[in-house]
Image: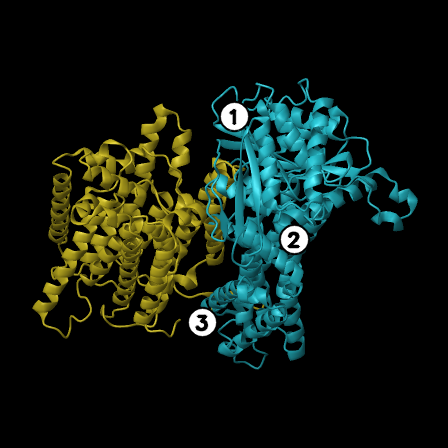
């Protein structure tokens, strides 16, 4: 597989995935493999279909408390016939294309980080495609038609273009300055547009905005983990950052406002959808079990403590943003990576796609592997969580021999594995700057031995 | 500052506290790391000893009824000699059918007519299996009594299969069981105290008929089953009793409770039944073990007759049966199929004897048990779902048997992690010392070929899936020498793997076999510990089959030794294929009943041993 050309690997994976998606019905995925983990109330395809159906019948889909997708999905339905949303072929193509695009974006991120151009091949491409396309955490939600797969594609696309929009990106030497700068601003706009879109589809993007914008502003997306320094902006005028930041924010805000207006327009100039879609991440109205750690806590919660703990849980997510972005200011992509890990572990409505994204992004940072302290332990904990989640959901819901505590216990195992991975990622990302891997001599004394790898 | 008074000063040594902390941590880690081999052995021993201790009377406890609503044995029963007469009457008609070699259709038609005459709504259902097991077909008969008291949202099933479970459905007819169900349906029609619909099912064949009936009842489609839709349906089935009465009379009632794929019914159901049966005066046993085990005859009499030893032997025999039914996933009878649909069910097996009991006692027990479950307001949920029965009135709670397999799995995990850490280090000469004294040996890190090992593992599982595909294909099952063809192919094909692997025995890269071994041990450990909650017997078997063998594999320099080890692992992994009958039965179970033992063996178990085999040759 390693010797395959990336395009061939991608084509193979697409073929395999499309066949899988076409042959395996989402209901059989959710009843055997994915179950509760594959989609959440915010990303369920079934809920989307119901919402579209109601919308087409002229009923406000947001009044029922079931439909929590963005109105942008409803705007799709006015362009497409309603039957197409239950067509297996259409769904197979849609989700496979989304994942293929995400895999392509992942390769793009890797190439740009290596200082290559987006179109230049590297030896790691095939592996990255396989890591993304054949990752069970990614393809099970896709087979179950969870819209979190589309969210992932959107996010990875935004990051890829953010990498391309970096200050003195690759190719800056040979090509004409004006061509380069226009290309760069185009990438920047694409990235910001996708970010605004992703903010609409999933509110947790707000947490990923700072590192992504830092990435756009930084000098280049290459790995700076081994040589930490202050943030180096890519602008000509190195002294002031205020203006570029404001411009960037303004552009993002412009797209975001336009999309908001569009959304309101779709549902007839109302704003009731905001509480149902964005608000759901903050008020947790639907406690359908999911692989996250919120739902069980809030089913057990007395009602008068609920607002307080909702606030605590939400603020807890926000707490990480500034420290991570400051500590890894020399490498914003790494900060982004750490924050996806934090989201996949602690976000209110996660699906398997979120840990899947975190897992796939590991592939972009091979330079830190050497410094990981317990990679196998982390991997085995994730494996246990991944296998136990469907099993215990099965014992609880179809066997009838288990109960909700079984499933919650496995989501805690999942959270532990996420935590282990995060701690190790932070450690390795910082440890690499110190350099050198220790050796031990016969007498048990430690000494610095740098081995070539 | 150092002179400041601090409480617990003796816990804080002088010097840099951070340095002290790091040193302490290192000391602790090296303490564990140096003893990990001993720890591993200790865990293995503890696990196996615990496994051996499961049948002992020290770990189990007496059963008790947890659900207060059940109130077993608190009612007056009305079943009497009149009903026994009815049963005898039905029996004589059934015997006539048997003697006239009636077809399934005629039989089921007759049974349906009897139901209709009694005044129940009744119907029949034809079914036929296609695909590999083409010949399996038949006709079920069933009847329903609508609950006189409430709307039929819930139901209870009383069933009997045409073939008895004697020797796994060897052809012994369950005529008295069928007669009991018929007489019982006539009997319950007279009473208005039923709070659930009662469904009477006489399924054809041994397991296949009930599989077809239950699939149709729950609207499940099975690709190789053509089953007629049911004309009559009722609500959710809570409990089911399967009656198996192959002999002329009965001496004991045996409990068979294991379901397909290792499921177990709620223990309250079994406990109520054995409580009622013993109150009625019929002795109860687990399975059909009414005599004491004879295997102990070689022991001196003093030891043989020791109470503890006798109990151990009897309970070990019960446990052995339990493992056989649970690990194989085939269940111990027709009741096992109900478990798939979350219905608590068991088989009451009338041990054939010349006396003293018969229809009279059996009917009273069934009536009382049915009245007990009639009391339930919701599904059985109290009591235990995870248990091991060592006797009809003794059982082990989950905490007393689960750790045995988990300990072995943890030992394997430690072994895997130890190999993984060892693979990262190599001893080589230090470059620094140029002097006349011998060069210092230093431990240096080396790279571990993770991806190659992962590809090999994925490849082996894929290979296992292909093996399963071949095993379950029609082609394989149509030729008699199938096993003799498949076994050499599956065992020789992996031998090409070493030639694909680049042989770079450099100092800076760890040998692939070490990394593969580490991953293999970790994955096996994960599989075992996860299976424990699903099917403990299977997990225990895996722990025995994989635990020590997988920990003991290693690469040797001698080619002959390599091949011996390789073939030993393959024999362990895929040798069962040569027992054609066993494979056929597993395939039948998979194809007809959906028992996942065969795919599990092919896709998970065989690849794990194959990886161990590859460790020996690459």
Q: How many marks?
A: 3
Label 1 crowding class (10 Å Cα cut-off): few <14, some 14-19, many 20+?
many
Instruction: Tell me the tag on residue B541.
Output: 2
- Specify the quadrant of the image occupied by residue A328: bottom left
Chain in cyan?
B
Instruction: Give the percent coordinates (x, y) of residue A311.
Output: 30, 33
Q: Is residue A264 left or right of residue A318?
A: left
- Specify the quadrant of the image occupied by residue B351: top right
Q: Is residue B120 left or right of residue A347?
A: right
Residue at x 15% of width, y 70% of height: A172
Q: Is residue A126 left or right of residue B318?
A: left
In this view of the protein, which residue sits in the foreground, B595 or B60?
B595
Instruction: Give the percent coordinates (x, y) of residue A451.
Output: 45, 71
- The residue most toward the left is A178
A40 w.r.t. B548: above or below: above
* Distance Cα–Cα, label 1 vs label 3: 80 Å
Label 3 crowding class (10 Å Cα cut-off): few <14, some 14-19, many 20+?
some
Tag 1 and tag 2 share a subunit: yes
Chain to which the residue tagged by mark 1 belongs: B
In the rendered image, the quadrant that contains the C terminus of chain B is bottom right
In this view of the protein, which residue sits in the foreground, B488 or B94?
B94
Instruction: Tell me the tag on residue B85.
Output: none
Chain to which the residue tagged by mark 2 belongs: B
* Distance Cα–Cα, label 1 vs label 2: 45 Å
Chain to which the residue tagged by mark 3 belongs: A
Query: Which residue is label 1 attached to?
Result: B146
Q: Colour of chain A?
A: yellow
Query: Which residue is label 3 attached to?
Result: A451
Helix, strand or loop at label 3? It is loop
């Amino acid at each position: 597989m390693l010797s395959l050309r990336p395009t061939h690997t991608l084509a193979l994976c697409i073929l395999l995935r499309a066949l899988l998606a076409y042959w395996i019905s989402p209901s059989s995925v959710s009843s055997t493999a994915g179950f509760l983990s594959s989609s959440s109330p915010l990303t369920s395809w079934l809920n989307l279909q119901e919402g579209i159906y109601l919308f087409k019948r002229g009923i406000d889909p947001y009044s029922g408390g079931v439909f929590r997708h963005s109105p942008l999905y409803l705007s799709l339905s006015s362009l497409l016939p309603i039957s197409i949303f239950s067509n297996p072929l259409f769904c197979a193509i849609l989700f496979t294309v989304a994942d293929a695009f995400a895999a392509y974006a992942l390769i793009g991120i890797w190439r740009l980080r290596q200082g290559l151009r987006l179109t230049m091949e590297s030896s790691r491409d095939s592996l990255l495609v396989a890591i993304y396309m054949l990752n069970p955490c990614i393809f099970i939600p896709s087979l179950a038609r969870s819209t979190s797969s589309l969210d992932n594609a959107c996010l990875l696309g935004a990051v890829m273009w953010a990498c391309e929009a970096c200050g003195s990106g690759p190719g800056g030497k040979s090509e004409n300055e004006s061509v380069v700068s226009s290309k760069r601003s185009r990438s920047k706009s694409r990235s910001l547009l996708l970010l605004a879109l992703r903010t609409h589809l999933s509110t947790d993007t707000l947490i990923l905005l700072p590192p992504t914008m830092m990435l756009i502003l930084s000098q280049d997306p290459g790995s700076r983990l081994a040589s930490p320094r202050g943030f180096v902006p890519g602008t000509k005028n190195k002294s002031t950052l205020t203006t570029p930041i404001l411009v960037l924010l303004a552009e993002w805000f412009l797209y975001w406002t336009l999309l908001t207006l569009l959304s309101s327009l779709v549902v007839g100039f109302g704003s009731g959808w905001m509480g149902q879609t964005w608000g759901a991440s903050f008020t947790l109205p639907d406690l359908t079990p999911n692989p996250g750690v919120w739902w069980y806590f809030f089913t057990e919660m007395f009602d008068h403590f609920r607002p307080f703990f909702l606030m605590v849980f939400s603020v807890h997510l926000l707490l990480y943003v500034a420290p991570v972005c400051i500590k890894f200011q020399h490498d914003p992509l790494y900060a982004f990576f750490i924050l996806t890990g934090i989201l996949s572990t602690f976000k209110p409505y996660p699906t398997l796609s979120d840990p899947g994204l975190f897992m796939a992004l590991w592939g972009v940072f091979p330079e830190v592997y050497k410094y990981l302290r317990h990679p196998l332990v982390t991997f085995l904990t994730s494996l246990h969580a991944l296998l136990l989640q469907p099993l215990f959901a099965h014992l609880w819901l179809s066997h009838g021999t288990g109960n909700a505590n079984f499933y919650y216990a496995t989501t805690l195992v999942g959270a532990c594995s996420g935590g282990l991975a995060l701690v190790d990622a932070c450690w390795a990302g910082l440890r690499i700057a110190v350099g050198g891997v220790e050796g031990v001599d016969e007498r048990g004394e430690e000494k610095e031995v740098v081995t070539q790898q | 500052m150092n002179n400041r008074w601090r409480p617990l000063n003796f816990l804080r040594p002088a010097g840099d506290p951070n340095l002290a902390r790091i040193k302490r941590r290192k000391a602790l880690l090296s303490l564990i790391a140096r003893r990990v081999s001993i720890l591993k052995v200790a865990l293995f021993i503890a696990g196996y000893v615990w496994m051996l201790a499961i049948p002992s009377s020290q770990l189990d406890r007496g059963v008790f009824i947890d659900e207060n609503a059940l109130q077993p044995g608190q009612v007056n029963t009305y079943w009497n000699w009149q009903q026994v007469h009815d049963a005898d009457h039905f029996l004589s008609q059934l015997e006539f059918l048997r003697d006239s070699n009636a077809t399934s259709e005629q039989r089921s038609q007759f049974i349906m007519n009897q139901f209709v005459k009694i005044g129940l709504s009744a119907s029949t259902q034809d079914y036929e299996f296609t695909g590999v097991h083409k010949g399996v077909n038949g006709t079920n008969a069933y009847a329903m009594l609508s609950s006189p008291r409430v709307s039929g949202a819930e139901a209870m099933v009383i069933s009997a299969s045409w073939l008895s479970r004697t020797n796994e459905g060897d052809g012994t007819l369950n005529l008295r069981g069928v007669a009991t169900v018929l007489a019982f349906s006539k009997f319950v029609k007279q009473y208005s105290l039923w709070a659930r619909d009662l469904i009477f099912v006489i399924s054809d064949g041994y397991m296949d008929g009930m599989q077809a009936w239950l699939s149709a009842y729950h609207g499940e489609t099975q690709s190789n089953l053509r089953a007629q839709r049911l004309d009559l349906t009722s609500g959710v089935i809570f409990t089911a009793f399967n009656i198996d009465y192959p002999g002329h009379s009965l001496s004991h009632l045996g409990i068979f409770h294991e379901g397909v794929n290792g499921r177990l019914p709620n223990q309250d159901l079994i406990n109520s039944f054995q409580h009622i049966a013993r109150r009625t005066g019929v002795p109860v046993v687990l399975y059909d073990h009414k005599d004491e085990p004879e295997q102990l005859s070689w022991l001196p009499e003093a030891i043989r007759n020791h109470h503890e030893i006798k109990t151990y032997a009897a309970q070990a025999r019960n446990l052995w049966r339990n493992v056989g039914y649970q690990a194989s996933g085939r269940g111990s009878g027709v009741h096992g199929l109900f478990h798939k649909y979350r219905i608590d069910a068991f088989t009451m097996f009338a041990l054939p004897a010349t006396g003293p009991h018969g229809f009279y006692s059996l009917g009273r027990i069934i009536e009382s048990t049915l009245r007990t479950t009639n009391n339930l307001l919701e599904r059985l949920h109290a009591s235990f779902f995870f248990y091991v029965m060592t006797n009809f009135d003794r059982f082990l709670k989950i905490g007393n048997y689960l750790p045995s397999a988990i300990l072995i799995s943890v030992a394997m995990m430690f072994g895997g992690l130890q190999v993984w850490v060892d693979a990262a280090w190599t001893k080589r000469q230090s470059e620094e010392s140029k002097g006349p004294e011998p060069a210092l040996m230093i431990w240096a890190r080396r790279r571990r070929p993770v991806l190659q090992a992962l590809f090999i593992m994925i490849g082996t599982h894929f290979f296992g899936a292909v093996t399963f595909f071949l095993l379950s294909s029609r082609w394989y099952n149509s030729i008699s020498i199938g096993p003799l063809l498949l076994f050499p192919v599956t065992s020789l094909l992996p031998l090409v793997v070493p030639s694909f692997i680049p042989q770079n025995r450099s100092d800076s890269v760890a040998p692939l076999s070490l990394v593969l071994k580490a991953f293999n041990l970790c994955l096996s450990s994960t599989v075992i510990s996860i299976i424990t909650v699903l099917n403990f017997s299977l997990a225990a078997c895996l722990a025995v089959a994989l635990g020590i063998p997988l920990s003991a594999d290693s690469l040797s320099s001698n080619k002959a030794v390599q091949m011996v080890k390789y073939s030993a692992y393959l024999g362990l992994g895929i040798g069962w294929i040569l027992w054609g009958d066993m494979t056929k039965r597993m395939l039948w179970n998979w194809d007809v009943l959906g028992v996942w033992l065969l795919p599990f063996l092919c896709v998970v178990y065989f690849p794990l041993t194959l990886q161990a085999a590859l460790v020996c040759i690459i």
